[in-house]
Image (cartoon, rainbow, N blue to C red):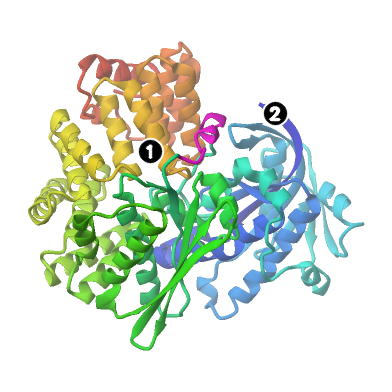
Amino acid sequence: MERRLTTILSIDVVGYSRLMERDESATLAALKSHRLELIDPFAASFGGKTIKLMGDGGLLEFESTVQAMRFAISVQNEMLSRNSDVPENERIVFRIGINIGDVIAEDGDIYGDGVNVAARIEGLAEPGGICIHRSVRDQVQDKLDLNFEDLGETEVKNIERPVRAFEVVLDDKAKALAISEPVAHTKSQISKWAPTLVGAVCICLVLAAAIWWRSRDVVPLTDQEELALAIPDEPSIVVLPFKNRSTVEEVGYMAEGFGTAITTQLSKFPQLFVIAGSTSITFADSLVKPREIGRELGVRYVLSGSAQSVGENISINATLIETESGHALWSEQYDVGVEEVFSAQADLVREIASTLKIVVEEEEVASLKKRQTDDPEAYELFLKAVAKSKLLNTVSRQEAIELLERAVVLDPDYLSAHIELSGRYLSLWRFGGSDDPKTALNKARRHAERALELDQSDYRVQHRLGQLHLFADHDHQLAYQAYQRAIRENSNDPEVLYDMGFLRSLMGEPSEAIEWNNKAKRVNPRYPGWYNFNAALSHFLIEDYQQALLLAKTGISTYPKSLPPRRILVATLAEMGRLEDAQIEADKLLEIRPDFRVSTHRNTPFLRSEDQDRYFGAMIAGGLPE
């Protein structure tokens, strides 16, 4: 725990609920665009860091009050331009509040009156405006040529004393202080913020509530994890998202799919260490240079690329960079039609393998060249479905399923589409969202069985079968065997590694589970917050309650409305004898899910009854209703 004086910036979306009700998908897409192209790079330019998301708002911290002010002015100025051609009822409009205050910093979060005042002042701002505390005005008035409107002493909710607030006049003077393009980091800035870049850059939809790729809530690395990011002995690489250099939406899907496929193919080489795509995608449109990426992720090589339409063809460019020197080892260009994309992927993977001195066997060459589908339309539907799935909202998930169903109608032998469909339906059955869970589970089985018929050696097929064996059949041994087969084929997929860890926890082997969870985190350094649930459960089972407590709190701080870390937090506090604290946390969980009952979670497939009884008994002792 640390106390410090800092500059706090609170930002939220005006009329967020109305926008979501009107068009959820369009609102989330717009927020994603603003985050990637505006909020993240501008915050980096002014030395800011994102602390957390709070539903429809966010909290950022700046060491320099002047830089916080320039960030706010630049964002609001740029939003005017971005909204100029958008119908008024569809516009994303921000309010911003800035305060200087004393805060308590703990576990990557900040608390205290300084934060509360920033949030209340933000509520005083006009839509598209900036409101600041008097202390901010005093700090910047001799350093920035700005006009302010005095709002006087104002009573605000939950703050005992009146607050003196000022509205920043966004006139020509203010515009002169704004930037329209982000400024690259200096080396000192990157070094300064290195411990928190993981959380700051990865936040997937700034100001949107708990969305983007299951994951996209990211936890800061602990000191132990930072030490684990030493460059491996084997060749190591991260494939950055391929950029769409055209205005054609379909090319964007193609670019994303191309980069993902390269990651998947490289991951299958046991001689390679490959960073997960779910981490690499957080560098989309990032200003971070390859040398810094190499340091943060612990890899020797970075592959970057782009795609653009050239007539009826697609031009794909790829560059392999050595991170230590920052020098490009080679660049390749492929001008191909849609039907030739798979061949280009195979050629590029072989070129990378050759450069990294990886011997590619003949059977591996044949596997690389194998086409996923002969139907270009089915391939396009698949790429669109994957993009929809990453948005992680109910509407997009259903749209993804519909696109995938159309793809397998066009090509009944489309392996990847069957695997993805099985996963989509399994998620509906496990996590809700289906009016008919039994049918969803049956469809998950049917598509997994079809995928098995098509290619039983594909690691993704074995992974999906393992999930079905564990969660649907409670057959731990078959699940273990399936996960083992998957890992033999691909030891770099973090989802398989994580699921193996979760299985070992449920089998009563928490120490082994911790090892698997750490492996998943290593190949996915910007891992999603829910990785901490299994880690917390493992430490709970070995009675390491302090570590379980820390991991549960970290999971909650990055995903406040997620129930699993809150469940384990209640259970852990109860086992520690802190029943009053456990009851407080139980009440918080029930605020999120009033109908929560421990009994509905007793189908969690623990192999040992004593583990199940201790875990669920602790939840009940902590105040959760049975």
- Of mark 1 and mark 2, the one earlier in the sequence is 2
Q: Secondary structure at mark 2?
A: strand
Query: Which residue is tagged 2?
Result: 2
Q: Is residue 136 left or right of residue 598?
A: right
- Most foreground residue, 65 or 412: 412
Quadrant housing the C terminus: top left
The residue lying at 15 percent from left, 66 percent from top is 408
Residue appearing at x 21%, y 47% in the figure: 459
- With 352 as the anchor, is 70 left or right in this view? right
Is residue 421 shown to the viewer in this render? no
Expressed as whole percent of the image width and height from the top left, the position of residue 596 reads: 32, 33
Q: Position of residue 525 (x, y in %)?
A: 47, 43
Q: What are the residue bounds of the magenta stretch?
A: 222-232
Residue closest to the eye, 363 or 109: 363
Residue mark closest to the camera, 1 vs 2: 1
Q: Circle 1 is placed at which residue position? A: 520
